[in-house]
Image: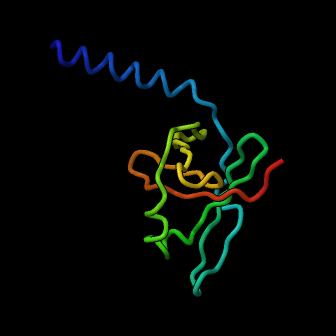
Amino acid sequence: MKFRLNLLISLFIIGGCSNSLPTYELEENFNTTVIDGVEYALHKLMINGNTYISEPEQYIKSDYYDEFKIGRKIGKTDDGMEIYQVENDENRLVIKGFMYPADFFKLESSP
């Protein structure tokens, strides 16, 4: 019984901490691109006036993207996906969630 109580308290604390993060706008499937004859959907993430576009190249050159280190969580989307900085590239962000792999986004424009 004590274990269950501690688990519930921990879940409430963790859940409460993530609620304080800002929520950013994710526009899914706003465009498409073709790479090596395969069509990929592009997604757009808007944060503080900056626009980031998803990188479908990560599915083709996965070894290159393995070099990036996911840093601290900076926000979330309306559907609960978590947004992280990339430690070793200030022009990239990562979106990931439960049972959803990391998706890389690269800065396209800033104010």
For image coordinates 45% across by 46% down, the residue present is: 97
Q: Position of residue 77 (x, y in %)?
A: 59, 41
Q: What residue is rendered at 57% in x and 38% in y?
A: 76
Q: Tell me: 42 left or right of 51.
A: left
Residue extending furthest toward the left:
1
4, above or below 42, in the image: above
Residue 55 image position (x, y, % from top left): 60, 65
Left or right: 29 as drawn, with respect to 108: left
Q: Nearer the viewer, residue 98 or 73?
A: 73
**Percent x, y of residue 30:** 71, 61
- Relative to 45, 15 lies left or right: left
Q: Residue furthest front?
A: 88
- Residue 19 percent coordinates (x, y): 54, 25
Question: Where is residue 62, by image quadrant?
Answer: bottom left
Nearer-the-camera pick, 30 or 9: 9
Residue drawn where x is 71% and y is 67% of the image: 31
Residue 1 placement: quadrant = top left
Does residue 73 lie above or below 29 as drawn? above
- Residue found at the very far bottom of the displayed protein: 37
Quarter where residue 83 is shown:
top right
Q: Is residue 77 above or below residue 3?
A: below
13 displayed left or right of 46: left
How many numbered marks does the figure carry? 0
Q: Looking at the image, which residue is at 67% across and 71% down?
A: 32
